[in-house]
Image (cartoon, grey):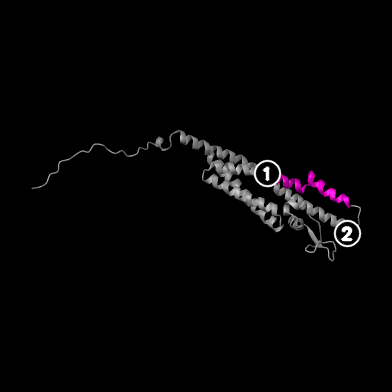
Amino acid sequence: MGKCDGRCTLLVICALQLVAALQRQVFDFLGYQWAPILANFLHIMAVILGMFGTVQFRFRYLIFYAVWLVLWVGWNSFIICFYLEVGNLSQVSRGVYLKIRLTDGAALIIILMVCVQKRDFLMTFNTSLHRSWWMEHGPGCLVTPVLDSQIAPDDHHVISVSGCLLDYQYIEVLSSAIQILLALFGFVYACYVSKVFQDDEDSFDFIGGFDSYGYQPPQKSSHLQLQPLYTAG
């Protein structure tokens, strides 16, 4: 009964992880966040493998799933630090900002765009200036385009975002925190269920496999009994 409960709970956790990862993948696609897209794809594959190992009693697949969850927790912790500008991530932005903070307003906006580009290097592989999709589509956000701007690159436009009930940084942090919470529960149950599977496999080998069920292969008789044959005359 305990093994069944553990398997069912692990399947529920994997299902929640799959739903959360797919939801996150959609919004990362909309925001052109290529690094999170790649990480989400690998996570989805690992979760599917974990579900397969749970259903098919493959403890090695569960061990792989548990190891991936450790990496997944590290990646989401990095995202939290990235959007909260912890450590060197914030020092890079301030360092570039302080160099030209005494210039006029137009130059100030340009350097802020450069800061965003440097901060987004790991998320977009430096292919664009796009940020999180939630930056412009967060709850209560009002987006106002700045017309006739001379400071935007050729294929970009300048916008003003105001009135957001929750900034996009905190939405991304909340999403990563949920991923970490699900990963921690998944790691614990994956280790537990894999240990149960391994114990059952070892006990099955110890008792001799099918021999314990009284199975005996058919034996050939070495003595042939001859019977007389009578024919009617």
Dominant secondary structure, magenta: helix
Q: At 72% across and 45% down in the image, what residue appears?
A: 78
Circle 2: element type: helix
Residue 233 in the magenta stretch? The answer is no
> Callout 2 environment at 10 Å: few (<14), some (14 to 19), or many (20+)?
few
Circle 1: residue type = Val
Circle 1: element type: helix
Q: At 83% across and 54% down in the image, what residue appears?
A: 112
What is the number of the mark on residue 106? 2
Residue 221 position, x and y percent, is 27, 37
In the image, which is nearer the foreground, mark 1 or mark 2?
2
Circle 2: residue type = Ala
Q: Which residue sits furthest top? A: 206
Left or right of residue 152, residue 193 in this image: left
Q: Is residue 221 above or below residue 106?
A: above
Along the viewing direction, whichever of 29 and 182 lies nearer the viewer: 29
Q: At 58% across and 38% down in the image, what residue appears?
A: 192
Residue 138 position, x and y percent, is 75, 56
Left or right of residue 7, residue 21 in this image: right
Give the magenta-colored segment's residue range. 75-100
Q: Is residue 198 above or below residue 167?
A: above
Q: Which residue sits furthest left? A: 233
Mark 1 to mark 2 CA distance (whole Å): 40 Å
Left or right of residue 47, residue 148 in this image: right
Figure quadrant of residue 228: top left
Residue annotated with mark 1? 73
Residue 14 position, x and y percent, is 60, 47
